[in-house]
């Protein structure tokens, strides 16, 4: 295992232009740190910049100013090839929508991140182990259309972990689930965080989810409070 990520965010700002040329400042100087292996919830009202912050942490977007360091490396200074490699090998993403490919089995979906290189027997073994770990041992050969919503989200979680990332980012991972499945998914997130020490950052509106994380970062009007 690669272990967790130390994350340091300093005075990050991000502004978007909307139709008509108006500028909207989404992040207005966010600073915080997350230690390796921590589980942190990011909360705040809609429009406070939570998802934008997560996208910057995962190198899917760039800050206009400020710095983001993951294990000492500054993401803003990476070229696009380096950022793509970082996203593939060091970050796992879980979204509200599972984004599974309907034509692939659960096992094949978990292996999708490995397709950027050569899929090895070790990748297949890890994908199978992760599906067993999330309770889907008997569903590996099933297609997404044959799985329940909770099962599909568990496949997505296994997919996020197959490359052994140091940083796991989850954006409203329980938002499309009923209460029982949401509780079960949070159980899995925290169990896997404790077992493999991957740093976990969860954006959520769900108070029950936020309360179970080790620490909470709240965003209001684009700032951390």
Image: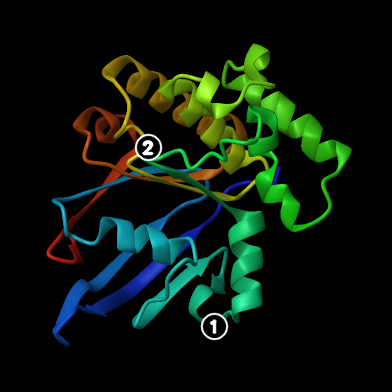
Q: Quadrant of residue 178?
A: top left
Classify mark 1: residues with Cα within 10 Å, few (<14), some (14-19) or many (20+). Answer: few
Camera-near label (1 vs 2) is 2
* Of residues 40 and 22, the one drawn nearer to the viewer in this rendering: 22
Quadrant in the picture for residue 190: top left
The residue lying at 40 percent from left, 19 percent from top is 184
Q: Which of 108 and 182 is in front in this view?
A: 108
As drawn, 49 above or below 203? below
- In the rendered image, the vertical position of residue 190 relative to residue 54, given as above or below: above
Q: Quadrant of the C terminus?
A: bottom left
Q: In this image, 126 relative to 17: left or right?
A: right
Which quarter shows the N terminus? top right
- Which residue sits at x=57%, y=63%? 71
Instruction: For the residues labelled 1 and 2, say whether their Cβ atoms are less than 8 Å apart.
Output: no
Q: Distance between the residues labelled 1 and 2?
A: 29 Å
* Residue identified by numbered label 1: 77
Could you tell which of marks 1 and 2 lies nearer the N-terminus?
A: 1
Residue 97 on image: x %, y %: 40, 40
Residue of label 2 = 173
Residue 163 visible here: no
- Given the current orientation, which residue lies at the most extreme top position? 138
């Amino acid at each position: 295992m690669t272990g967790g990520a130390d994350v340091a965010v300093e005075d990050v700002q991000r502004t978007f232009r909307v139709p008509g040329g108006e500028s909207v400042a989404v992040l207005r100087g966010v600073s915080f740190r997350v230690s390796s292996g921590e589980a942190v919830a990011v909360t705040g009202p809609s429009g406070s910049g939570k998802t934008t912050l997560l996208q910057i942490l995962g190198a899917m977007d760039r800050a206009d100013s400020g710095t983001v360091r993951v294990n000492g490396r500054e993401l803003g200074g990476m070229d696009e090839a380096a950022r793509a490699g970082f996203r593939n090998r060091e970050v796992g993403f879980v979204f509200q929508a599972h984004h599974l490919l309907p034509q692939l089995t659960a096992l094949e979906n978990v292996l999708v991140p490995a397709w950027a290189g050569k899929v090895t027997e070790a990748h297949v073994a890890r994908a199978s182990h992760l599906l067993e770990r999330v309770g889907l041992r008997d569903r590996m050969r099933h297609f997404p259309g044959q799985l329940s919503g909770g099962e599909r989200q568990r496949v997505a979680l296994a997919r996020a972990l197959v490359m052994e990332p140091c940083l796991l980012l989850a954006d409203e991972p329980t938002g499309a689930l009923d209460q029982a499945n949401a509780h079960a998914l949070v159980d899995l997130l925290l169990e896997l965080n404790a077992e493999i020490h991957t740093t976990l950052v969860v954006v959520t509106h769900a108070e029950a989810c936020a309360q179970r994380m080790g620490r909470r970062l709240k965003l209001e009007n684009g700032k951390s409070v």
